[in-house]
Amino acid sequence: EGIGSSYGVIHYKGKVWSLRYRGEQYTFTRPDDGTPMGHIDVIILGKGKQKSKSYYEAYDQNAAGGRPICASIDGIVPDEDVTKQQSVACGICPRNTWITNAEGRKSRECSDYMRLAVLLLPTQTKAATGNALMEPVFLRVPPASLNNLAVFGETMAGQGWPMHSFVTRIRFNPDVAHPEMVFSPLQALTDAEGPVIN
């Protein structure tokens, strides 16, 4: 809610962060040497009520503009605009069943993800795009990062910190090959910043 049709989207490929906004792609780089930035700082404004689902015919989720052939925003039934619906409902879909892959790991062809609406810190968007972006953007949290997000949210809420009351730093776990997000609190927001967040 509250995100218009031309909202920006945060991408990550090869553990490099970028922003697609109004038809342009911007990579987040370090101000000191111009290399890709290893983290983004955001304020988490909201998240989907449940996990969403996506199925790619060939594993190419991180390709620029890559779109799943079947997907479900609500995780219950496929979206109306999918190109190749795999089932009438996610609960009975063969792509949504657990299988053991060649490495002996259990997985599903259709993967879960969480949708977040976040506000990138204006200093980061100004450095990347030339303008401070003061509107929410979309961030897709991949399956391998869902547990990290849940534990982080529960821990902070248990200490009396709702997600929208502080800045969250998101980086990638350097110990794994795939892009697993790690979430950590960076700084509390002040009352003066409240109207912007609201």
Image: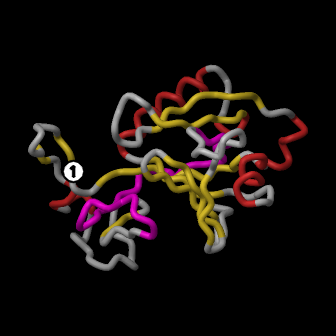
**Where is residue 29 drawn, in percent x and y?**
64, 47
Number of marks in the rendered image: 1
155 vs 29, left or right, is left
Q: Residue at x 28, y 64 (%)?
A: 56
Q: Residue at x 78, y 46 (%)?
A: 123
Q: Mark 1 = which residue?
A: 108
Q: Position of residue 78 (x, y in %)?
A: 33, 69
Image: magenta residue range: 39-65
What residue is at 64 percent from the left and 67 percent from the top? Answer: 21
- Is residue 79 visible to us here? yes
Tell me, yes or no, if residue 75 can be seen here.
Answer: no
Tag 1, which secondary structure?
A: loop
Q: Farthest residue in the front direction?
A: 33
Q: Give above or below for 101 relative to 152.
A: below
Quarter of the image with the N terminus is bottom right
- Lateral position of residue 30 relative to residue 71, left or right: right
Q: In this rendering, would 49 be left or right of 109? A: right
Q: Is residue 70 left or right of residue 156?
A: left
User: What scheme was used to colour the molecule?
Assistant: secondary structure
Check the image and report above or below for 66 versus 104: below
Task: Give the percent coordinates (x, y) of residue 82.
Answer: 35, 76
Q: In this rendering, is residue 19 above or below 57?
A: above
The foreground one among 61 and 13 is 13
Q: Is residue 131 magenta?
A: no
39 vs 52, nearest the viewer: 39
Q: Residue 134's image quarter?
A: bottom right
Q: Is residue 52 magenta?
A: yes
Q: Amino acid at mark 1?
A: Arg
Task: Give residue 162's position: percent from left, percent from top.
Answer: 66, 33
Q: Point out the residue furthest to the top here.
A: 159
